[in-house]
Image (spheres, helix red, strand yellow):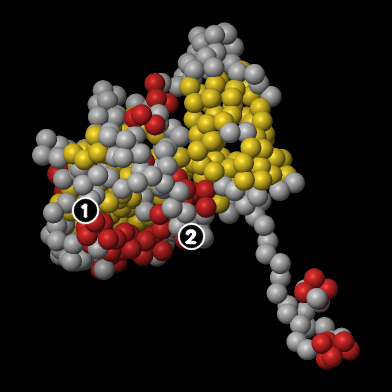
């Protein structure tokens, strides 16, 4: 009966009175399937990455190139651990492979490009030694620190671009920082995916296995929070091992969670908020392990630095800044608010960390305005509180 009447809700039929009330409930809409490939261009070396398929029903994957293998090629329901393996390219020209997803009566094609042997632009581990980007949220990176810069993209309504960037530490198996833009549009809509898994940009052997909690009772602490990316495929990326650090459970669920909520509130009253979340690892850091026995450093502190941009603000090119530094031993019952010991200027945080945050700000607003933004004490600015 619902099929007959669902498109004519509110119309009057003689038979309706006899049959009683008719439900106007719509049939659920099945979302279009998605195929997500983390890296569209890869090294000439033999390697692999993960594919993600997002669909409620059955799916098949195939390739038109014999140098590509997909494992598994068939399945049902969403999966984020499909291996895309490729052989070494020994030729002097690049080559392409079309990866084809068939699901829900639709076909999606993504193209994988493999560099030629003589022109390999993708460094080891697919990382980059410095940012080479103009994104406002990015901190400084160095050529010789042994860390690699990566980023994930996303597509949501009205936006196609970066999800978040991270600076990977292979020795300690944590991201030293994660950086991203945030506003109501970029947050998107949806719910928590809990899709714990490996980051396809970094070899599984070089990141923690976060399908279970860290040994010793340490929580899997997000750097970019799940609640800051609600569209499904963007949210899945927040559950990668490269976004997690071992965090005290109470710290994670209380003071840190309240700070994350404050950052979201700042974003919602900004045109865009540029966020850096980082962890501090040093000689005082103890270590824990994942379920595979890989050793991971436990940060001694965490920080957040943010730039709020509002085009209606005339001063300093529309920017204002705030920074927070929390020792991992900070009592979980505390709340970060005005005049809390953790609140400081961006410049003070830079001096504490020994690094340069928001390297692209001077180029956008000039040295004088950038200095004013970075040295202003946020405790004196009511906008934050």
The residue closer to the viewer here, 346 or 171, is 171
The tag earlier along the polypeptide, 1 or 2, is 2
Residue density around tag 2, few if under 14, some if 14–19, many if 20 or more, within 10 Å? few
Residue 217 vertical position relative to residue 14 in the rendered view, above or below: above
Q: Quadrant of the C terminus?
A: bottom left
Instruction: Give residue 17's position: percent from left, percent from top.
Output: 83, 91
Q: Is residue 157 found left or right of 328 in the rendered image?
A: right
Q: Crowdedness of circle 1 by 10 Å Cα count: few (<14), some, many (20+)? A: some
Q: Are marks 1 and 2 in contact (CB under 8 Å)?
A: no
Q: Is residue 346 above or below residue 121?
A: below
Residue on which disc 1 sits: 248
In the image, residue 378 above or below residue 111? below
| Residue 91 in view (yes/no) | yes
Q: Which mark is residue 78?
A: none
Q: In the rendered image, is residue 187 in sight?
A: no
User: Which residue is at a point 18% across and 58% down the rendered structure image?
Assistant: 343
Residue located beneath label 2 in the image: 191
| Towards the viewer: 374 or 10 | 10
Percent x, y for residue 196?
Answer: 41, 46
- Disc 2 secondary structure class: loop
């Amino acid at each position: 009966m619902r099929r007959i009447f669902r498109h004519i809700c509110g119309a009057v039929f003689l038979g309706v009175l006899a049959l009683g009330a008719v439900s106007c409930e719509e049939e659920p809409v099945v979302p279009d399937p998605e195929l997500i490939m983390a890296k569209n261009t890869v090294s000439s070396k033999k390697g692999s990455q993960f594919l993600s398929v997002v669909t409620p029903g059955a799916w098949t994957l195939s390739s038109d190139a014999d140098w590509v293998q997909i494992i598994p090629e068939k399945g049902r329901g969403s999966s984020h651990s499909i291996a895309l393996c490729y052989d070494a390219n020994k030729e002097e020209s690049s080559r392409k492979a079309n990866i084809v997803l068939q699901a829900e009566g639709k076909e999606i094609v993504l193209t994988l490009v493999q560099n030629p042997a003589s022109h390999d632009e993708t460094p080891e581990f697919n990382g980059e030694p410095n940012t080479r980007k103009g994104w406002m949220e990015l901190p400084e990176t160095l050529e010789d620190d042994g860390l690699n810069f990566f980023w994930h993209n996303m597509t949501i309504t009205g936006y196609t671009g970066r999800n978040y960037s991270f600076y990977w530490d292979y020795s300690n198996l944590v991201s030293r920082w994660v950086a991203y833009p945030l506003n109501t549009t970029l947050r998107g809509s949806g719910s928590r995916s809990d899709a714990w898994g490996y980051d396809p940009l970094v070899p599984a052997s070089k990141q923690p296995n976060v399908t279970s909690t860290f040994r010793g009772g340490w929580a899997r602490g997000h750097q970019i929070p799940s609640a800051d990316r609600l569209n499904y495929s963007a949210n899945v990326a927040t559950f990668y091992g490269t976004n997690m650090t071992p965090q005290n459970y109470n710290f994670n669920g209380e003071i840190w969670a309240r700070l994350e909520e404050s950052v979201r509130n700042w974003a919602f009253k900004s045109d865009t908020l540029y966020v850096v979340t980082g962890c501090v690892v040093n000689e005082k850091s103890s270590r824990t392990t994942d379920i595979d026995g890989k050793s991971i450093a436990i940060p001694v502190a965490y920080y957040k630095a943010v730039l709020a941009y509002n085009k209606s603000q005339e001063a300093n090119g529309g920017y204002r800044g705030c920074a927070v530094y929390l020792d991992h031993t900070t009592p979980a019952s505390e709340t970060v608010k005005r005049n809390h010991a953790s609140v400081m200027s961006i410049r003070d945080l830079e001096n504490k960390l020994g690094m340069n945050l928001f390297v692209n700000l001077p180029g956008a607003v000039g040295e004088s305005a950038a200095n004013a933004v970075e040295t202003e004490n946020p405790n004196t600015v009511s906008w934050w509180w």
